[in-house]
Image (tube, helix red, strand yellow):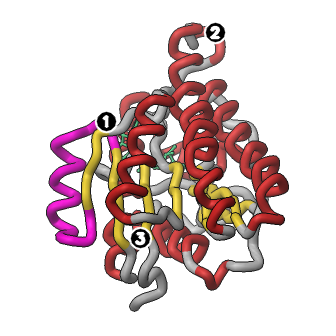
Amino acid sequence: MGRLAGKVALITGGARGQGAEEARLFALEGATVVVTDVLDDDGKQTASEIGAAATFHHHDVTSEADWTGIVESVLADFGRLDVLVNNAGILAIAPLVMTTEADYRRIIDVNQVGTFLGMKAVVPHMVERQQGSIINISSVAGLMGSPGMIAYGASKWAVRGMTKSVALEVAPFGVRVNSIHPGIIETPMLEEFERWGIMPQVMERVPVGRKAGTVEVAQLALYLASDDSAYSTGSEFVVDGGMTAG
Ligand code: NAD
């Protein structure tokens, strides 16, 4: 307990799934948590279940104006922002030739441009305070090829690369940037695999033979948010049940 005492954390896409779990765990560890999402009802419920340590704000990560507003609001309310988890993401599965340009651009916009805008919005404040941890949620799809996921894979490889580029820029100023690469995590996102009826084939690629619970990713995010990871920046942190080991 108390590993994030005194810190303020902003978690995008925090209404449900992994983001909500990170918000719960960070609050338990003493953080003030700002949950943001486009899903207002789920987001308000998640924040109210956490209690006084959490607030919810509507926030579309593809909008630079939304980013400016949320960061100004956090700094006005709490005077600091120590941790950003760029967690918001979308997945749509389709073979290359069935992927429309609009679908491709939408996934890049949320997963990649959203992460870019988030880092751009918080880095000036973190650099000024000479401290901060940015955690970008990529995927195993950002470490290897993933058939049927041209856009998602491109966006998650980009998140991995952007993480390293920004980490190098801000390391001299005490700000750290790392990526997390989850495998198969039990959240609503898996419905896309169910819709295509490919969950059994996907699970064949998981050596430990099971999906992960959201807390198994949240524990890694907690480590990266906390000062325990003070010497880690520009790195990939994989939580995938062995998927990328082979
Ligand atoms: P999820 O669908 O439950 O959560 C994603 C959240 O992002 C949702 O609450 C959604 O409303 C929000 N979101 C979508 N578009 C947004 C936007 N424009 N602005 C703000 N919020 C938006 O799925 P999850 O598994 O919790 O996903 C969290 C992250 O983990 C994503 O980046 C995802 O790509 C990544 N990931 C998930 C898995 C998995 O197996 N579930 C594996 C690897 C990586």
Give whichever of 160, 128 is nearer the camera.
128
Question: Dot 3: few (<14), some (14–19), or many (≥20) neighbours within 10 Å?
Answer: many
Mark 2 or 3: in front is 3
Q: What element carries label 1?
A: loop
- Mark 3 C-beta closer than 8 Å to ligand 1: no
Q: Which disc, if any, is residue 97?
A: 2
Horizontal and vertical percent position of residue 174: 73, 69
Name the residue rendered at 65%, 16% in the picture: 96
* Amino acid type at mark 1: Val
Q: Where is residue 141 in the image (x, y as percent from the top left)?
A: 66, 43
Image location of residue 143, percent across then percent down: 74, 48
Inter-mark Cα distance, 2 to 3: 36 Å
How packed is label 1: few (under 14 Cα within 10 Å), some, or many (20 or more)?
some
Asked if residue 28 lies in the magenta stretch, the reply is: no
Do labels 2 and 3 touch, CB within 8 Å?
A: no
> Which percent across, then down, holds residue 77?
32, 59
**Discs 2/1, front:** 1
| Residue that numbered label 3 is attached to | 215
What kind of element bears circle 3? helix
Residue type highlighted by circle 3 = Val
Prevailing SS of the magenta stretch: helix
Q: Which of 61 and 197 is in front in this view?
A: 61
Task: In the rendered view, tell whether residue 26 sits above or below residue 236.
Answer: below
Residue with the mark numbered 1:
38
Quick one: label 2 or label 3, which is nearer the N terminus?
A: 2
Q: Answer yes or no: do the residues labelled 2 and 1 have beta carbons within 8 Å?
A: no
User: For the magenta stretch, what is the residue range?
Assistant: 37-54
